[in-house]
Amino acid sequence: MATWFLIAVSAVLGALLLWGLVAPRSQWRVLVGWSTADPDSAEPGDGIHGVRRVVCALGLAGIVAVAGVQAWRMIDARPTPASTPSAVQLMWGSPTPHLVDRIVTPDTAAPAGLVEGPLDGAQPLVKGSPPAYLVDLPRFALLGAPVPPGLVGHTPPKGYTGYGQADVVVEASGPLDCIPRSVVAVADGERLELAVYWGLPEDPAAAGATCDMTASVLQTVLIPVQLPQPVDDRTIVSSSGTGVPVVPVRK
């Protein structure tokens, strides 16, 4: 109610100021001249009318400025409509994980000196037909180095990708100062056990023991893995036997 009252007062005041700016003589005659015995002789000179024009112009500018500020505040205070999440966000969450675009063949035993990190999801792939969204994912880099020493897997040949012949993409988390150094996969008739091990980007593997998996902020990466056999109907689990969520492909 108060807002509408202020708008009405501002509109009336603005109209009066605009009238005084455009026709100060007419305004004086209507508002003041009727109270004098001889309006022609009592009317102020051109100088006073000029001053009135300046005052009215300043008043109008003030009203416009205040109205503009209030309108901006009202627009800024409106709730922002929720944006529609992308297919990548629906699959892997936010922020978007970076892709380790390397040819990765798994080890069969846990490497010494590295630290196992959590697995957040896995997505079985059809070998030779990777989902299109992988093309646009940001590539993994550490402090500006696209291929830090010791990064898991090896660089694909020119014209190829690391995920093109992968059987599964694994979402793994680790400390910001460490890199994924090894993927271990053990399969039997019913289960596929996966684990990702992290270490520092230097060459003794024992340096990986300094990776702190309890850090409050972790990075998330997607690692394509080429398996001896497709995932098929196997249940994907971590090294501890905990089920790893299977992430369906979204378009």
Image (cartoon, grey):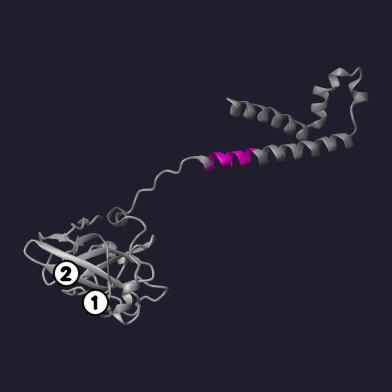
Q: Residue furthest bottom?
A: 203
Q: Residue at x 39, y 45 (%)?
A: 82
Residue assigned mark 1: 112
x, y percentage for residue 214?
34, 62
Q: Residue at x 12, y 72 (%)?
A: 228
Query: Magenta residues: mostly which secondary structure?
Result: helix
28 in relation to 48, above or below = above
Using a 10 Å C-alpha cutoff, classify the residue at mark 1 as few (fewer than 14 neighbours), some (14 to 19) or many (20 or more). few
Residue 218 at x, y percent in the picture: 36, 63
Q: Nearer the viewer, residue 134 or 218?
A: 218
Q: Write the residue at 86% across / 18% down.
A: 35
Three-letter code for the amino acid on which mark 2 is drawn: Ala
Q: Is residue 2 left or right of residue 201?
A: right
Q: Eyeballing the image, is 73 above or below 228?
A: above
Q: Give the number of the disc on residue 19.
A: none
User: Residue sitting at 80 percent across and 23 percent down?
Assistant: 31
Total marks in image: 2
Q: Which residue is mark 2?
A: 185
Of the pair 153 and 86, the residue shown nearer to us: 153
Looking at the picture, which amino acid does disc 1 mark? Answer: Ala
- For the residue pair 184 and 1, the one nearer the viewer reads as 184
SS for callout 1: loop
**Dots 2, 1 in contact, CB < 8 A:** no
Range shown magenta: 67-76
| Comparing labels 2 and 1, the label whose residue is closer to the camera | 1
**Quadrant position of residue 118:** bottom left
